[in-house]
Image (cartoon, rainbow, N blue to C red):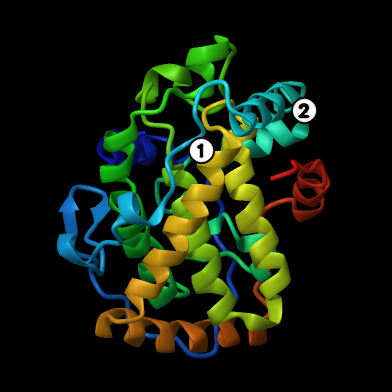
Amino acid sequence: MRWKPLLVLGLLFTAAGCAGTGTVRPAAQTPAQAIEEIRPGIAKGYLQRDQYPDAIRLLPPPPAPGSAAMAADEQAIQQALTLRGTPRWDVASQDTRLGFPEAANVFSCALGFDVSEDHQPALYRLLRRSLTDAGFSTSAVKKHYRRLRPFVVNEQPVCGPGGAGRLTPDAAYPSGHTAAGWTWALILTELAPEKADDILLRGREFGESRVVCNVHWPSDIVAGRMVGSAVVAKLHTNPEFQNDMQTARTEVLSSWEAGLTPTRDCAAEASALSTRQTH
């Protein structure tokens, strides 16, 4: 999808009643800093526009109609459509929501605690600001290829609030959600290497949720991961990002030490995510 509507609509999807982390606080906290916004609710990224990865150069074209790669995409989508109405579909629907504070807890089960602006301000800031960088990094290549989304081709339902009406029909390649989720996964594996396998698996499943939702082809997901990886490489050249990473590592350790726990039903999430795709 094009990034502006993706972000604006994502902000509307924050669920009422998103639970906090309880009364226990980490042993050491850094003061929360106001996060600069480029428009209400949308954080300013770390990168300047001319610092975004050149995704048009980095990515191959999407599979051509009639190709073996396109046939594989179509087969995977048909398999994913069988998950409609299952717990995996429900997780995929939840994964559509990129608004904060809800999106801060996509990885809460993998990390072992909820993330909030009060408890882990630097980590929260990293997630919000890097979301913007990842999203904008997909914009040019989406407009370049204008690949149709699966639901346009197969006329089947999509998951998530708002249905297909919230999506740009010809902005499938690459997946912006996947770019954001993989950016987050790579950042979090650096901050919590002790949980790296769980974090990377959740990052993978976050992208696969877009196939389950019938809004992206598998090859869009692979391309989104490539963009996310490139974004993280670029972020490491930014001093503000580096400083936030150092502080966030301390917050992660303090959260574990304080015994914070996720409020999500992690057993149910793990069971739902055990239904795997093949890309």
Residue 264 appears at what percent x and percent y?
68, 53
Q: In this orientation, which residue lies closer to the viewer: 121 or 232?
A: 232
Residue 70 in percent (x, y) is at: 59, 28
Residue 25 visible in image: no
Q: Secondary structure at mark 2?
A: loop
Question: Could you say which quadrant of the image residue 92 lies in?
Answer: top right
Q: In this figure, which residue is indicated by the disc labeled 2?
A: 86
Marking on residue 131? none
Mark sitting on residue 96? 1
Q: Find the residue positioned furthest to the top.
A: 155
Q: Amino acid at mark 2?
A: Thr
Q: Dot 2, crowdedness within 10 Å: few (<14), some or many (≥20)? A: few
For this rendering, which residue is in front, 134 or 9?
134
The correct choice, above or below, for 15 with respect to 119 in the image is: above
Which kind of residue does numbered mark 1 sit on?
Thr
Residue at 32% x, 63% y is: 129
In this picture, residue 47 sits left or right of residue 110: left
